[in-house]
Image (cartoon, helix red, strand yellow):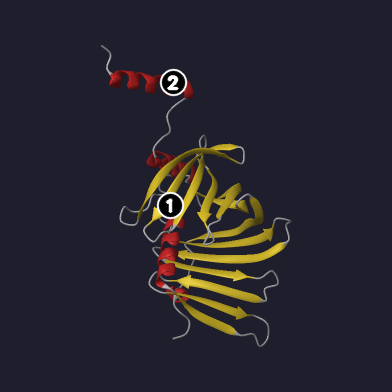
Amino acid sequence: MVSLRSICALLAFIASTTTGQANPTASEVIAKARSAALKEPTSADSVKGLHIEIRFTDADKKPLGSTLLELIAPQSRRQIDYTPDFSTESVTASNGLEGWISRRDLRPGGRIENNIIQFQQVARMREITISDLSFYSAPDAKEGSVNLIGTTEIDGKKVYSVEYKFNSGYSVTRHFDTKSYELVATDQTMPDGKVQRQVVKELFWVDGLSFTKREEIYLGEKKVAHATYEKVIINPAVSEASFAFPIR
């Protein structure tokens, strides 16, 4: 008599030969995605920080402003946002232990306002920084986990979707091309519950590392912005004082 286990094994074999190779594990997808993003296996080993400059336009290509982002491992993050006319500057920064927001009117006689960030947001910023500097690596087991959600199609490409979850509640889903394993899109859930999707339109290389050059940004199904990454500097000269609260 043929056992149920044998029948199940036979059906699984038939399915794999009919539909192609079964989905890889999350770890296998991540390993191949890192390989696709690095010229050499050790290319990311010396990366301790990043300086990134981004220009934003709306769906009709009208200027929305620009952002300067500085990340220093393991937990320091500073984001400086400017309005299109550079009349207003907004700084959000954290050294992983405390964080602050500064808003400044750059016009003559403009006011400055500084505020402390709550601990929960500081923890979230810390984990976003760890994730951004990981080059797709899974978080440490004490920090979070990864899960292969499955496959879907984005921008005409079949992708593997990998969810990265951190203990603070921060999560990000990265979608990798099933053939090239290049990054196709990134999803994050906004505070209002809407999903923001950043669809990669172009990649470029800096010192043996692959970065996004252009992307389209969607909220739900609606395109809301375009982003152009104008400059990426690896291991910039940034003082830790840049991430400390400016006024005591």
Up-down relation of residue 21 to residue 75 (above or below): above
Up-down relation of residue 76 to residue 106 (above or below): above
Instruction: Please tell me which residue is depicted at 47% across the width and 25% down the height of the picture.
Output: 20
Residue 200 appears left or right of 160 = right
Indicate the secondary structure of the residue bearing disc 1: loop
User: Residue 124 at x, y = what percent?
Assistant: 43, 64
User: Residue 217 at x, y = what percent?
Assistant: 62, 54
Amino acid, disc 1: Ala
The residue that disc 1 covers is 44
**Circle nearer the viewer, 1 or 2:** 2
Amino acid, disc 2: Thr
Callout 1 touching callout 2 (CB < 8 Å) = no
User: Residue 174 at x, y = what percent?
Assistant: 49, 47
Alpha carbons under labels 1 and 2: distance apart: 37 Å
Label 1 or label 2, whichever comes before in sequence order: 2
The residue that disc 2 covers is 17
User: Residue 183 at x, y = what percent?
Assistant: 53, 45
The quarter of the picture where the C terminus appears is bottom left
For the residue pair 178 and 234, the one nearer the viewer reads as 178
Indicate the secondary structure of the residue bearing disc 2: helix
Q: Is residue 45 visible?
A: no
Instruction: Please tell me which residue is depicted at 53% across the width and 60% down the height of the picture.
Output: 233
